[in-house]
Amino acid sequence: MRLAEVERGDTLRHRLLIRMISRFAGYRLPDAARVAFYDRDFAGRALGEWTNRAMRGPSAWSVSERELMAATVATWNECPFCVGAHRAVAVLGMDDAVAAAVLVDYRTAPISDRLRAALAFLDRMTNDPDDLGGDDVRAALDAGLSVDDVRDAAAVGAVFNIITRNANALDFEIPSPGDFARAATMLLRRGYG
Amino acid sequence: MSKDASHHDLAERLRAQARSVGAGAPGVNAGAVDAGAGQPSDLTEPYRMLAEQVGRASFRVTDAHVDAVRDAVGSDQAAFEIVMAASVGAGLRRWDAAMRAIEEAGDAAR
């Protein structure tokens, strides 16, 4: 982590909380959680609430599908922390081989046409936002998505285009595969709020 | 705010928070939102270089980018807010593009 105070915590309460959670969980509290605790009155609380709405709120997309969308956005943004963290949550509800195939190339992975269309939309939105247009939405609708489905997927894309940048710019420490898996169980249970 | 709140409301709240003054000098966080979104901004160095890099290719941000901003603003908190603001700018640029695309698709269908 590039900023020591973010890693340590900005209040006594947060510093104690970080130490306590790490001790009880048995692994170093991931940097994403430390960022979520830090300077919450600036943008952290608002980002956490939108992230929780996008990832755990009402949606036709399953939690695993949303987590896989997050991991895929992280792949495009070259964020190894977020790929590991969100793939680990996704595979709690889907086949690991399917998740792996999506992260290599969603266009050829064994997934539904609906999910493939959502990922194609997120691909354009993430990598070429100035060229995103009505045709991209119509392609998604033709594949069976509703406008709400497109909007819900876009919200996942938006928050993970933020979170991946925070993670990369602050140089989040990468946990071991075992610690990613342990943290995923907590993230699935507790959400992002 | 509940899990049923609209994406629109949550996005606008985040936009307003990220543009707020926070721990640094007035205008710097708002400038970082704009620079992170790839828009023109009044940011000076070293803030501009960090905010633009976060928006364009965050995996290429270096210790030197962050250290220069940390030294210039004098606190981890103000430096953190510039990173956060630039990231929010990049994410909301894409959210705005998605909402325009949905509107465009709806207009064409009418």
Image: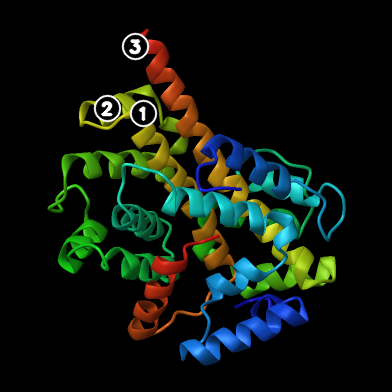
Q: Is A62 placed left or right of B54 in the picture?
A: left
For disc 3, the marked residue is B109
Q: Examine the rendered structure and indicate whether residue A79 appears above or below residue A22.
A: above
- The answer to whether the residue labelled 1 contacts the one labelled 3, judged by CB atoms less than 8 Å apart, is no
Residue B52 can be seen, yes or no: no
Mark drawn on residue A63? none
Residue drawn at 79 percent across, 43 percent down: B42
For the residues bearing labels 1 and 2, Cβ distance under 8 angstroms: yes
Q: Chain of mark 1?
A: A
Chain at numbered mark 3? B
Question: Which residue is tagged 2?
Answer: A141
Picture quadrant where residue A64 is located: bottom left
Disc 2 to disc 3, how far (Cα)? 12 Å
Name the residue type under label 2.
Leu
Q: Mark 1: few, some, or many residues within 10 Å (few <14, many ≥20)?
A: some
Amino acid at pointer 3: Ala
Q: Earlier in the sequence, mark 1 or mark 2?
A: 2
The image position of residue A165, as x and y in percent, is 54, 59
Residue B64 point in image, percent of width and height: 67, 73
- How many numbered badges does the structure rendering display? 3
Horizontal arrangement in the rendering, residue A172 relative to residue A87 (left or right): right
Q: Which residue is mark 1?
A: A147
Identify the residue at horizontal 82%, vertical 51% (top origin): B21
Identify the secondary structure beneath mark 3: helix
Q: For the residue carrying disc 3, how many other residues have a C-alpha within 10 Å: few (<14), some (14-19), or many (20+)? A: few
- Name the quadrant of the N terminus of chain A: bottom right
Query: What chain does badge 2 belong to?
Result: A
